[in-house]
Image (cartoon, helix red, strand yellow):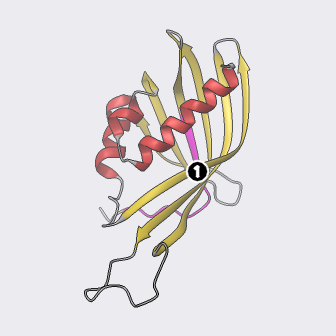
Amino acid sequence: MSPERAVKQVLAQYVRAADALDGETLSQLFIQNGKVEIYYLNAGDPTLLFVLNGKEQIANAISNLMKPHPPKGWSHHTTHDHIIAVEGDYAEMDAQFIRFDSVGAIRPEGGWPVGTVGLKGSVIPTESVYYKPSLKLENGAWKITTHRIYHDLTFAFPEQ
């Protein structure tokens, strides 16, 4: 496998772990002291919102701080237009990302109306982001050193 494809696979594993809200699996894609930097892109003028430092904070944020999926619901983090540069044991990536939330419809108490067929529910885009991870080759595996996430939408925090 080419280094570029191997780097792209790390992001594919990342988004699947994010969909599953599996912080432990996601955190294993990072070096021990890796970090996640979250920005609000603010029409091209990035503002740093917060930083997650180390595997423990990263795992906790994914498993315990992200909003859980609703009943019959799931998320799909999709990445597109990957730009990857590899220089020896280091790599940089820039990828566009859209998150879609899907929620299956609840079957009515009396059953579906006569003639109803097919998939029922909704798919709604909920996030628009740029992912810009930096990676390094560590013991034969690509690991994220810093994962920069640039949100296009305003980020709301719970009241403190």
Which residue appears farthest toward the left when viewing the image?
Answer: 109
Question: For residue 84, which quarter of the picture?
Answer: top right
Which residue appears farthest toward the front when viewing the image?
Answer: 115
Name which residue type carries label 1: Thr
Of 119 and 103, which appears nearest the observer? Answer: 119
Q: Position of residue 61 (x, y in %)?
A: 35, 44
Badge 1 marks a residue whose secondary structure is strand
Q: Which residues are magenta?
A: 147-157
Number of numbered callouts drawn: 1
Q: Residue at x 69, y 19 (%)?
A: 2
- Residue under numbered circle 1: 78
Which residue appears farthest toward the top when viewing the image?
Answer: 139
Q: Is residue 109 visible?
A: yes
Q: Residues within 10 Å of mark 1 (few under 14, many from 20)?
A: some
**Any magenta on residue 133?**
no
Q: Position of residue 5 (x, y in %)?
A: 66, 27
Q: Quadrant of the C terminus?
A: bottom left
